[in-house]
Image (spheres, rainbow, N blue to C red):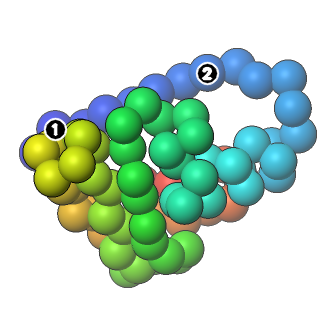
Amino acid sequence: MAELVVTQDVTAPSELVWSVLVDWDLHGEWMLLTRASGGAGVGEPIEAFTGIGRVGFLDRMTIVVWEPPRRAV
């Protein structure tokens, strides 16, 4: 299993950054060509489709770590 880790320093309150990152419906506004939906908490599913129209990739994920406002895996 591959792991992707992304680190970015941001000059905003962690609670604000967290609320944007886990607002799955807004992902398309900052993640190019991606639509996402899902839950909040361990065991909840997330689905993200990256592509144009019906051509693309669907990623199905499950949240295994949920530590707001610091960490989601």
Disc 2 designates what residue?
Answer: 8
Indicate the amino acid at tag 2.
Answer: Gln
At mark 2, the secondary structure is loop
Label 1 sits on a secondary structure element that is loop
Looking at the image, is 70 positioned above or below residue 6?
below
> Which of 72/30 is in front?
30
- Left or right: where 1 falls relative to 51: left
Q: Are marks 1 and 2 in contact (CB under 8 Å)?
A: no
Q: CA distance from mark 1 to mark 2?
A: 20 Å
State which tag comes first along the sequence, 1 or 2.
1
Q: Between 23 and 13, which is closer to the camera in this rendering?
A: 23
Left or right, 66 with respect to 50, comes to right
Find residue 61 and report its horizontal and vertical position in percent.
27, 63
**Residue at position x 47%, y 35% from top?**
31
Q: What amino acid is found at the position of numbered circle 1 in the picture?
A: Ala
> Would you identify the image quadrant in which residue 42 lies?
bottom left
Q: Is residue 72 visible?
A: yes
Residue annotated with mark 1: 2
Quarter of the figure with residue 33:
top left
> Image point 59% across, 52% down: which residue?
26
- The C terminus: image quadrant: bottom left
